[in-house]
Image: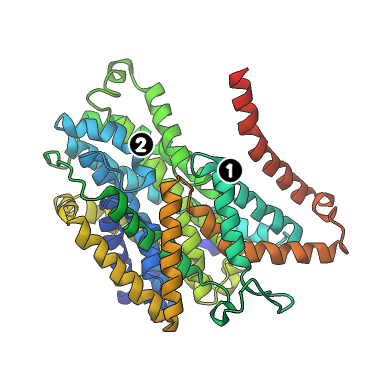
């Protein structure tokens, strides 16, 4: 009963006019960002972090959450109409959605996408409401050895799952860990790896790295390698579904929701896995008369299931972020840095120390889902027009925002040079297919993992066996080993 009273308090906070305005702006901006190919919530949140520094924490978090799940809604529009996913989570939507659009059923595809996202987002938010406080209560019992092993698991899974190569993922992670070690040692106060550069004594700002690698790096990469790509739009139809399409969609929405949510709550590297699993499941379970639509004219189940899985996974990522302080996606990694900007450390104590903020954030998810349904169904035609913005003007605007935001943090020209250097690193990483997410995860969580490891060794009086003496930390280490070894064993078995 206590959960529901706290949730009502959250609705009272999130329902104030100023917070409703921030939620609406976040949802609208997130949808627009999702529609524009190449941009995503991570880039946008990173770009706006410095600018929202003066905004009250609760309003700021509601705003960023609106951008996060708004981008998931918007990404499906370009996938269906242009075969250009705005987000990696909407790649699978393009498989059947674009074929539906080509066969004159774009309206039905957009409708099942928007309504499925609403259904999945709402159910997943109810699950967050019920399970996040319980997980937080359990997490309080974890000590430094367990936290270090949990962070090691996050490092391993994010690096191994993102990108096409585990080696490249691990390399990107070590780049982030190296950047995280620059500055003053938080335990001994010793200055390290600064090269006698005074500006590096406080470490490298996560916001600066995120803006450099994502926003500015994205703009440079597009200017250098992609240029002006022009796609033709499919003809729009009215956004509605027939009775038969409703009947085929709702089981796919539910299956997608309960497939996506668990993947969001574990450090498994994003929405790609549950959306592909959902698509494979829908293809397997489709009625015989509908199977022939897959890959030809487009099957509505192939849009409904993956879109629901995508949005449920996105909502699920908030569970480990809020209860353990562990990000399981690029955007949640940047959201973690947003919390830290306000001096708030997500983790087991967050539900006690900042309960007003947490419950307002959860309540805003319910409000945002309704806002997004209202925004997406009637305004699809408007969002599609955003695709006509020329890329040179679009990326020039991003560079202006990024420069003003980063310079505004400390009024330091050194930060701008550093941002430029990181942007070039981001271009090289994209050019040679190195995932960028592990860099951010390593930068944010590296110093935290180091502190937990040193605390654990203090508890164990210098003995490394402290990590295998405790059942929970031993179990997590076994899982880490399985994550690293299993893909190689499977690959070896396939070759044999």
Tell me what residue is drawn at x 71 percent, y 47 percent. Answer: 476
Position in image of residue 377 (x %, y %): 20, 49
Q: Residue at x 19, y 34 (%)?
A: 101
Q: CA distance from mark 2 to mark 1?
A: 26 Å
Q: What numbered label is drawn on residue 92?
A: 2
N-terminal-most mark, 2 or 1: 2
Residues 368 and 130: in front is 368
Q: Tell me if residue 284 comes above or below residue 69 in the rendering.
A: above
Viewer-closest of 411 and 370: 411
Which quarter of the image is occupied by the N terminus? bottom right
Rendered view: 167 above or below 142 = above
Instruction: Tell me what residue is drawn at x 22 percent, y 25 percent.
Output: 297
210 vs 188, left or right, is left
Give the position of the C terminus as an image quadrant: top right
Residue 301: x and y, percent? 32, 31
**x then y, percent, for residue 28:** 26, 61
Q: Is residue 242 left or right of residue 473?
A: left
């Amino acid at each position: 009963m206590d959960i529901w009273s706290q949730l009502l308090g959250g609705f009272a906070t999130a329902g104030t006019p100023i917070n409703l305005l921030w939620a609406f702006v976040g949802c609208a901006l997130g949808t627009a960002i999702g529609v524009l190919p190449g941009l995503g919530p991570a880039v946008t949140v990173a770009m706006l972090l410095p600018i929202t520094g003066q905004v009250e924490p609760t309003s700021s978090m509601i705003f960023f959450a609106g951008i996060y799940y708004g981008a998931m809604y918007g990404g499906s529009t370009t996938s269906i109409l242009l075969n250009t996913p705005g987000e990696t989570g909407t790649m699978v939507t393009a498989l059947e959605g674009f074929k539906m659009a080509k066969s004159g059923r774009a309206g039905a595809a957009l409708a099942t996408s928007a309504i499925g996202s609403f259904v999945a987002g709402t159910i997943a938010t109810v699950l967050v409401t019920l399970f996040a406080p319980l997980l937080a209560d359990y997490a309080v019992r974890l000590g430094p050895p367990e936290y270090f092993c949990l962070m090691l698991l996050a490092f391993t899974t994010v690096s191994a799952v993102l990108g096409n190569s585990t080696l490249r993922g691990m390399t990107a992670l070590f780049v982030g860990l190296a950047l995280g070690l620059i500055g003053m040692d938080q335990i001994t106060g010793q200055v390290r790896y600064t090269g006698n550069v005074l500006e590096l004594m406080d470490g490298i700002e996560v916001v600066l790295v995120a803006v450099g690698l994502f926003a500015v790096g994205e703009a440079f990469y597009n200017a250098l390698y992609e240029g002006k790509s022009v796609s033709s739009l499919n003809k729009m139809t009215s956004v509605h579904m027939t009775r038969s399409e409703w009947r085929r969609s709702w089981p796919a929405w539910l299956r997608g929701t309960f497939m996506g949510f668990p993947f969001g709550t574990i450090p498994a590297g994003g929405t790609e896995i549950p959306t592909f699993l959902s698509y494979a499941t829908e293809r397997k379970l489709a009625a015989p008369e509908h199977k022939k639509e897959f890959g030809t004219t487009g099957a509505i189940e192939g849009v409904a299931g993956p879109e629901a899985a995508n949005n449920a996974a996105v909502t699920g990522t908030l569970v480990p972020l809020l209860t353990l302080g562990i990000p399981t996606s690029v955007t949640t990694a940047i959201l973690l840095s947003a919390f830290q900007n306000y001096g708030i450390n997500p983790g087991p104590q967050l539900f006690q120390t900042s309960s007003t903020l947490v419950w307002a954030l959860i309540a805003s998810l319910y409000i945002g889902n309704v806002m997004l349904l209202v925004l997406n169904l009637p305004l699809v035609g408007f969002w599609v027009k955003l695709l006509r913005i020329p890329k040179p003007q679009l990326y020039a605007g991003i560079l202006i925002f990024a420069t003003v935001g980063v310079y505004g943090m400390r009024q330091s020209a050194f930060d701008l040079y550093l941002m430029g250097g990181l942007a070039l690193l981001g271009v090289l990483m994209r050019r040679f297919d190195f995932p960028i997410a592990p860099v951010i995860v390593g930068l944010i969580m590296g110093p935290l993992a180091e502190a937990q490891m040193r605390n654990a060794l203090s508890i164990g009086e210098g003995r490394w066996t402290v990590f295998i003496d405790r059942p929970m930390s031993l179990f997590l280490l076994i899982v880490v080993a399985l994550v690293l070894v299993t893909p190689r064993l499977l690959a070896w078995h396939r070759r044999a």
